[in-house]
Each structure stands twice: as structure tokens, then as C-alpha cells.
């Protein structure tokens, strides 16, 4: 979905009762295809700012950002004004329309043609209504969008119209109190897909002539060879997340161009990795995971390594799972690794060691878990074990001696963390088990404490 306006969610709890800060009187999305192969996407919003807090939250309600590609898209502003409580209208000045380069396209030359129209709404005051109506004319036959009709504020009326036919006509949609709370279990009844035309038939390239840097991997075992290619891509190629692939008409850039420019969309980077894997003798095929709504982020690579099929995301550091075993989301994850000694120097001879952060499925940030909440936390059941061994320099010791945390929470799971020193070897063992897919309010405080312990267990000090 191309960004229609910015929604910035606070991590603090929103009021669950009483008058909301604002409400959408109308949101309308209208899609019209034409016989010449083009289409019009028209969007209208009318949002009334009911309380002063909605006025002062200017980044939420005072600006609208619209991305488009002038090479095949034309943006037309049909209406833009603020209706004041006394009935008068405030029209934005010409300087309120700023045509700029989106931040996630700034450091990749071939994406510099993408534009972002920033509209600064003026005349905001308590009780006013901001009205914006624009049309994006696209010289293409295809557009695939997935969006949620539920917004930060209640919506009185939401319409989705396709070629004159009313697809969805919803009234009195409640405000989205779930997205404001990280890891909340969010309802999906208001999610919708609009699919016009057919997506391209993407194919991965079988060779990348200028990627001579990977030829040195030829003598490595297949699994190590594939892992080395993906690691090189993650460490050396700038991946631009956030750009809707509709802005590029769902095209993937040739692998040689991505390699030479050293940048691209996630789709570009995965496709380039496919070509590099084929160059080093790994049978690799570009595929798309249709369960991922964001098309740019949905590309994967199917590889055959030692006669075993894997579907991998080279942008992720997660352990690869054979295709046949991928359905078992609860399969135990075991990592036993030796780490180089790279401490962060502190004062008075102390050093801090931080274990890798890109662990398996347990990636909940405890800083985003507020002290109390009234919505369950969505979690993913897991069983993860990590054992890291670090060779310490001579006369270097673990501060505080052996460290150990071990406990469980009924109906939620358990953690076990042990850090100890044996001679010059420092051994850090971490084990976490989550047995549920959501944490209710009764167990939330204990779960939050568990996540804090899990995060703290990644750091320890030596001297």
C-alpha cells in the first residue's frame, strides 16, 4: 500500500473510553481502470479534530505524505482545505505543498526519481475538519494493495469502491487501540485486499558475471558457501525497506545493476542473491511468499543444498529450515557457537561483552512493553537454546563470578540463563521456552519481567 498519510503510534496507552481526540468522518478509496491500460486511484479523507491534543499532535494530523513515481504516475490534488467550526475554509498556500525525495530513496541513485508530496495542513484548531482529496493516475494495468480500515481514531464511514462497485461500506469502525500497543493481538476483520491486474512473472537470474568476489568460495561445502554469499550481501548491500513496489510497477532491477549500485529494494537484493548463489554452484530459484502482504518484502530463494530443499530469506540471519520441516513452527532451535573476543572498553579496566541480538523467534523488545496494559500480548511459541563460548585474554575474569537466572511462569514458559568462566573460556548459555501464542493480563507482569531478564542476559562484564 502506498503511504497515504503518516500514522505515528505512541507506545503509551490510548484512552479506552470517553471522547476520542479526533474521528474520521469519511475515508474513501476509489479505483477505476480504463480501456487504455491506465487507472485512477482516488483517495479522500475528512478528519475532525475534536480535542486540543489532536491539534498539537501535528505530526499525526497536520501533514500528509503521498509517494508517487512521475515516470508513470501523475498526482492531482482535487481538494485540500481546513473547515473551521464557524464554517469558514482555510486553503493552504502554495508553499504548503512540498515535492521532495522520500528519505528511504535518498542514497540510491536509481530511486531518486521517486517523489513524495508533503502537504502541510493549515488553520488547525479544536473542532476543525481537515479535508484532502487527491487522484493518482497510473499508466499501468496493475495494482495490489493490502490495508486496514481501522485507524488511530474512530471512523464514521469508510468506503472502498472498485470500478463503480461498492466493495466495502463500513460504518462506525472503532479506533485502533491495538497498534498503539506493541505486540498486541489485533483483530483482522477490517483488513482488505484490492488486486487489479496481474503481477509480473518474476524469475531469478542464473548468473551474475561481475560478482567475481564470490569465486573464492568455490571450495567450501555447499551450506557454508550459501551462508557466506548471504552474509556478504547483508553486510555489503544497502537494502531500502519501506518503498511500496507499486512505485516501480512491481519491477525488479537486474542483478548486475544492483551489484554495481550496491543498493536496492528488498526484492532487488533477494533477486541479486539468487544470481550470486547460482554463480557459486548452488541451485537457486527466486520465489514469492504469497502470505506476506508487503510484496517488496515477500521474495525468498528456494535452494537445493546436499539434496535438501530450503526456502530462505537472505536478508534474515535466522537459521535455515528444510522446506518439509518449515511447517513445524515450534521446532527447537539450537545454536552452539564460538565468538571472537570483541568487548566494549569501559572505565577502570572493565569491559562489556554483548551477545548477538539476531536470535531466533524471540525478538520482543522489553522497552516497548509498558508497565500495564489491557490488551493481550501476541507471542510466538518457541524453544530456543544458545551456547556461546568466548576465549578471554590472559588475566581477564568474569565480574561477579558465575551468574544464573532460572524460573518459569505457569501457562507462559520459562527461561534459563547461565554465564560462567572455566579457565580462559567464558561460556554463556541461554534457553527460553514460550508455550502460548498470547499472554493474558493475569500473566502480563511476569511475562514482562521475563523479557527484561532475557534482554539483560545478553550483557555481562569482564575485567
Image (cartoon, rainbow, N blue to C red):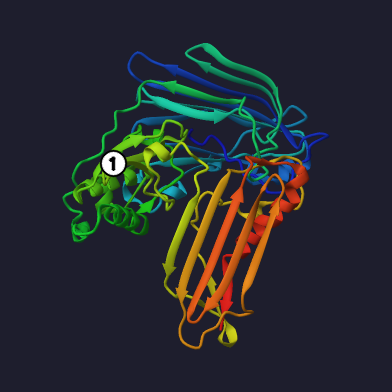
Residue on which the image places disc 1: 253
16 w.r.t. 432: above or below: above
Give coordinates of residue 26: x percent, y percent: 65, 24
Q: Nearer the viewer, residue 21 or 213?
A: 213
Q: Residue at x 60, y 50 (%)?
A: 433
Quadrant assignment for the C terminus:
bottom right
On screen, residue 54 versus residue 264, left or right, reads right
Q: Is residue 211 visible?
A: yes
Q: Is residue 167 left or right of residue 285?
A: right
Furthest residue to the right?
18
Sort mark 1 into few (<14), some (14-19) or many (20+) by Cα contacts within 10 Å: some
What residue do we see at 76% from left, 41% from top?
374
Viewer-closest of 106 and 345: 345
Q: Can you give x and y, in whole percent of width and height, for residue 20 in the image?
A: 77, 35
Q: Quadrant of residue 195?
A: top left
User: Residue 172: x percent and y percent?
Assistant: 71, 22
In the image, taking residue 101 as reference, residue 127 lies left or right, namely right
Would you place residue 350 above or below residue 140 in this image?
below
Amino acid at each position: 500500500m502506498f503511504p497515504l498519510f503518516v500514522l505515528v503510534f505512541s507506545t503509551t496507552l490510548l484512552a479506552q473510553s470517553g471522547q476520542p481526540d479526533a474521528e474520521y468522518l469519511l475515508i474513501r478509496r476509489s479505483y477505476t481502470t480504463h480501456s487504455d491500460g491506465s487507472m485512477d486511484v482516488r483517495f479522500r479523507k475528512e478528519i475532525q479534530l475534536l480535542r486540543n491534543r489532536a491539534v498539537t499532535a501535528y505530526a499525526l494530523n497536520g501533514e500528509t505524505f503521498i509517494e508517487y513515481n512521475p515516470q508513470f504516475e501523475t498526482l492531482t490534488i482535487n481538494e485540500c482545505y481546513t473547515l473551521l467550526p464557524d464554517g469558514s475554509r482555510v486553503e493552504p498556500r502554495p508553499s504548503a505543498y512540498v515535492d521532495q525525495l522520500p528519505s528511504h530513496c535518498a542514497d540510491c541513485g536509481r530511486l531518486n526519481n521517486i517523489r513524495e508530496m508533503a502537504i502541510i495542513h493549515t488553520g488547525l484548531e479544536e473542532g476543525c475538519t481537515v479535508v484532502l482529496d487527491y487522484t493518482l493516475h497510473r499508466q499501468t494495468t496493475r495494482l495490489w494493495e493490502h490495508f486496514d480500515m481501522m485507524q488511530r481514531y474512530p471512523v464514521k464511514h469508510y468506503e472502498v469502491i472498485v470500478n463503480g462497485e461498492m466493495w466495502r461500506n463500513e460504518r462506525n469502525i472503532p479506533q485502533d487501540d491495538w497498534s498503539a500497543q506493541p505486540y498486541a493481538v489485533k483483530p483482522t476483520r477490517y483488513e482488505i485486499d484490492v488486486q487489479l491486474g496481474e503481477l509480473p512473472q518474476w524469475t531469478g537470474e542464473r548468473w551474475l558475471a561481475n560478482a567475481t568476489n564470490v569465486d573464492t568460495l568455490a571450495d567450501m561445502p555447499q551450506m557454508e558457501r550459501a551462508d557466506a554469499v548471504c552474509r556478504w550481501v547483508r553486510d555489503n548491500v544497502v537494502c531500502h525497506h519501506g518503498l511500496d513496489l507499486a512505485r516501480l510497477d512491481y519491477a525488479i532491477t537486474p542483478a548486475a545493476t544492483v551489484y554495481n549500485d550496491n543498493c536496492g529494494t528488498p526484492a532487488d537484493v533477494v533477486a541479486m542473491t539468487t544470481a550470486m548463489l547460482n554463480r557459486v554452484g548452488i541451485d537457486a530459484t527466486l520465489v514469492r511468499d504469497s502470505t506476506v502482504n508487503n510484496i517488496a518484502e515477500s521474495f525468498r530463494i528456494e535452494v537445493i543444498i546436499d539434496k535438501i530443499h530450503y526456502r530462505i530469506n537472505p536478508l534474515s540471519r535466522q537459521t535455515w529450515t528444510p522446506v518439509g520441516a518449515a511447517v513445524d513452527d515450534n521446532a527447537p532451535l539450537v545454536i552452539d557457537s564460538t565468538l571472537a573476543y570483541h568487548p566494549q572498553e569501559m572505565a577502570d579496566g572493565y569491559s562489556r561483552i554483548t551477545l548477538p541480538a539476531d536470535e531466533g523467534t524471540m525478538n520482543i523488545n522489553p522497552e516497548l512493553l509498558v508497565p500495564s496494559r489491557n490488551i493481550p500480548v501476541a507471542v510466538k511459541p518457541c524453544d530456543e537454546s544458545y551456547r556461546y563460548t568466548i576465549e578471554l585474554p590472559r588475566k581477564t575474569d568474569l565480574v561477579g563470578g558465575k551468574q544464573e537466572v532460572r524460573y518459569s511462569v505457569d501457562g507462559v514458559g520459562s527461561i534459563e540463563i547461565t554465564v560462567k568462566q572455566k579457565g580462559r573460556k567464558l561460556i554463556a548459555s541461554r534457553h527460553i521456552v514460550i508455550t502460548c501464542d498470547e499472554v493474558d493480563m493475569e500473566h502480563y507482569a511476569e511475562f514482562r519481567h521475563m523479557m527484561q531478564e532475557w534482554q539483560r542476559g545478553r550483557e555481562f562484564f569482564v575485567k
